[in-house]
Structure formats: structure tokens, C-alpha cells
Amino acid sequence: EAQVTQNPRYLITVTGKKLTVTCSQNMNHEYMSWYRQDPGLGLRQIYYSMNVEVTDKGDVPEGYKVSRKEKRNFPLILESPSPNQTSLYFCASSPQGARYGYTFGSGTRLTVV
Amino acid sequence: AQTVTQSQPEMSVQEAETVTLSCTYDTSESDYYLFWYKQPPSRQMILVIRQEAYKQQNATENRFSVNFQKAAKSFSLKISDSQLGDAAMYFCAYMAGGTSYGKLTFGQGTILTVHP
């Protein structure tokens, strides 16, 4: 089944403790992206990647890191999480150009206390 | 930066009736793409319909259609014969073409309630 898989689905962590949210897609898509969803703000793009080793900032990149060493994987790293990063996170992928829209993962609910 | 505005935080419709969700966007680009996504309570994001700016014909997917008014920068979603399963949060989204491929900007969302 074609899908975007992100893990974990739920995560509670403490301020300052480094964490990684994994994302993997099995559709050989070139584009991958991370979003955060907050009430009243919709989804905001954190980072996106056009292919292996090619990434660019979205609208809210502060406090996040990404890497794209393999085409199928695009992990999101929070090196020192803070409570304002408590949010619902989505990973997504798309074929060349992303003009056909992204396919989204199931989301990760992150709580930073 | 491009902005996408959904001015209706909540909408409701009776089952089998028609409802229209509004979306406006701000851009100086001529090449861009517009999308509507549905997010049911399961929180999964599902692509409903897409529109390419250079196409004058409005996109249609079964009961879902759009009214794309390029000059007015308006992109509304019409849901016909509404069903209980249409109840969800709906997001409008914009992506410029060219060197901005991949950068997707969402509106704030509209919660749609469907009454039996």
C-alpha cells in the first residue's frame, strides 16, 4: 500500500530533551515536507525537500532540523524542544514538482512539558 | 509571502443539501496551484480537489467542484448532495509554480458540520 509513515503517533517529552520524529514514504516521491498544525493557524510548513540532500525552509523553521540522506526518509529533529513546539506534526510526500498535491502521513501529536 | 484566507471558521449544512466554502489568496504569481484538503476527526489529511491556475475550466471531482475566479483571487469549494461523511475540517492551500514548487501555504480551515 502506498503510504507515508511517521512515528511515533503520540509523544510526550520534557523541555530540552532532543527528539526525532521519523517519516518514510514508499512511493519513490522526490518531494517531502513537514508541517505543524495549531488551532486557528491551519498547517504551516516547517521544511521541505526537493530530493536527496536538497532541503529548504518553510514558514516556521526555527527550532527544527531536517535531513534527507535517502529518498524515502525525511526525519524531523528537535534538538532542544520547548513548550511552544507542542503541536500536531504532519509529514507529507509528493511526486516531482508537488503540483499534484502532497500525500500526508497520519500525524504525530507532540507535547513538550 | 503568499497568504491564504478562509473567512468562515464554521459552516453547517443539511444532509443532501449543497454548501460552499470560501477561500481567497494573495499572490503576484501567474503560475500556481490551488488545493482543497479534508481533515476528518481521524486527523488524516485527504486531498479533495486541485486546480491549475492556467486552466480556466473549474475542476470537478464527483460531488466536489470549485469556483475559481483568478482575477478575484478566489477559490471556493462546492459540496453537492452533502453526506454525513463530509463532516470535517476543510483547508484551502496554495502553491506557486517554478522555483517555489513544494512550498505549500494553507488557510486557517473551515469546520463543516453536516446535520442529518
Image: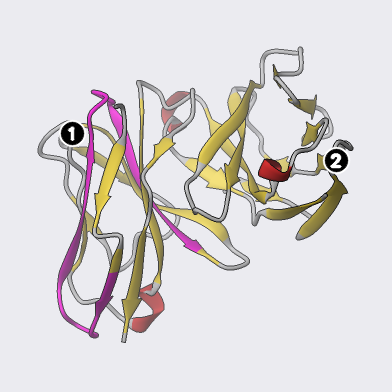
- Residue A34 lies in magenta, yes or no? yes
Give x and y (percent) for residue A14. Answer: 23, 85
The reply, left or right, for residue A39 in relation to residue B18 is left
Q: Position of residue B68 (x, y in %)?
A: 78, 26
- Report the side of A25 relative to B85 (left or right): left
Is there CB contact under 8 Å for labels 1 and 2?
Answer: no
Question: Vertical placement of B59 versus A25: above or below?
Answer: above
Looking at the image, residue A72 sits to the left or right of residue B64; the answer is: left
Q: Which residue is mark 2?
A: B19
Q: Residues within 10 Å of mark 1 (few under 14, many from 20)?
A: many
Rendering quarter of residue A95: top left
- Residues flagged by tags 1 and 2 on a common chain: no
Where residue B15 appears, x then y in whole percent?
84, 42
- Kind of residue at badge 1: Arg
The foreground one among B41 and A17 is B41
Q: Chain of mark 2?
A: B
- Residue marked by disc 1: A72
Please report the bounds of the magenta region as a residue range: A11-37
Q: Depth check: give the residue in front, A23 or B41.
A: B41
The reply to whether residue A96 is in sight is yes
Q: Decide which of A64, B80 is in the foreground and name it.
A: B80
Residue type at the position of mark 2: Val
Residue B69 visible, this angle: no
Residue drawn at point x = 69 percent, y = 49 percent: B87
